[in-house]
Image (spheres, rainbow, N blue to C red):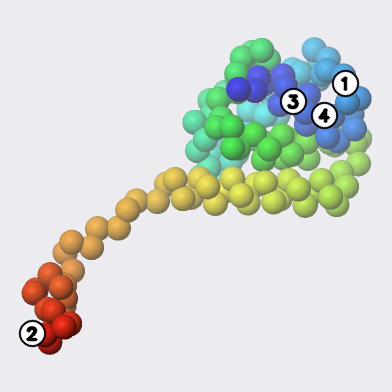
């Protein structure tokens, strides 16, 4: 499971703010966790995306999201953090962030769907439940 710091570091690396082998500074971490909390609250309240996330204070704590949502969070957080660092977001990064967000949204919607209960509907004539046999036409 990823930590809050690793998610923030990945986002900053993706937008070119820190080098590939670098780690977010304390200031970048504090800003990143604040923006992460704001982004996740917006997703929950505006987009009805509930990943089980709750506001974080510690950079070393495990981020409370499913593994399958990490790429969407990292790429979207990169877009959110870019203006602060005057980072240029490429069309490719926007496309990747959009694709991962859409994928996450589909999965969340699938998980929130309730199974259909069709037990109140009639079986209809010719239904096997009423004893119809196609071989005898009875």
Q: Nearer the viewer, mark 2 or mark 4?
A: 2
Left or right: where 73 falls relative to 121? right
Cα separation between marks 3 and 4: 6 Å
Mark 3 touching mark 4, by CB under 8 A? yes
Q: Residues within 10 Å of mark 1 (few under 14, many from 20)?
A: few
Mark 1: secondary structure: loop
Mark 3 touching mark 1, by CB under 8 A? no
Left or right: where 58 falls relative to 31? left
Cα separation between marks 1 and 4: 11 Å
- Say which residue appears at 65% left-offset and 47% top-offset: 101
Mark with earlier residue (1, 4): 4
Name the residue that disc number 3 marks: 8
Q: Which mark is residue 10?
A: none
Mark with earlier residue (3, 2): 3
- Say which residue appears at 65% left-offset and 23% top-offset: 2
Q: Which mark is residue 12?
A: 4
Mark with earlier residue (2, 4): 4
Q: Residues within 10 Å of mark 4 (few under 14, many from 20)?
A: many
Mark 2: secondary structure: loop
Name the residue that disc number 2 marks: 138
Name the residue that disc number 1 marks: 21
Left or right: where 81 falls relative to 132? right
Cα separation between marks 2 and 4: 71 Å
Mark 3: secondary structure: helix
Mark with earlier residue (3, 1): 3
- Say which residue appears at 79% left-offset and 49% top-offset: 94
| Residue 66 at x, y percent in the picture | 55, 32
Q: Residues within 10 Å of mark 3 (few under 14, many from 20)?
A: many
Q: Nearer the viewer, mark 3 or mark 1?
A: 1
């Amino acid at each position: 499971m990823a930590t809050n710091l690793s998610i923030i570091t990945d986002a900053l690396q993706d937008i070119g703010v820190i080098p590939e082998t670098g780690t977010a500074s304390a200031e970048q971490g504090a800003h990143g966790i604040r923006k992460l909390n704001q982004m996740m609250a917006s997703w929950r309240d505006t987009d009805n995306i509930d990943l089980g996330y709750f506001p974080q204070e510690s950079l070393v704590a495990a981020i409370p999201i499913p593994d399958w949502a990490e790429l969407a969070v990292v790429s979207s957080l990169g877009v959110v953090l870019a203006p602060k660092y005057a980072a240029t977001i490429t069309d490719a990064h926007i496309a990747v962030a959009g694709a991962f967000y859409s994928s996450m949204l589909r999965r969340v919607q699938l998980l929130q769907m309730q199974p259909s209960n069709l037990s109140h509907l009639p079986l209809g004539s010719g239904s096997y439940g009423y004893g119809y046999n196609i071989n005898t036409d009875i």
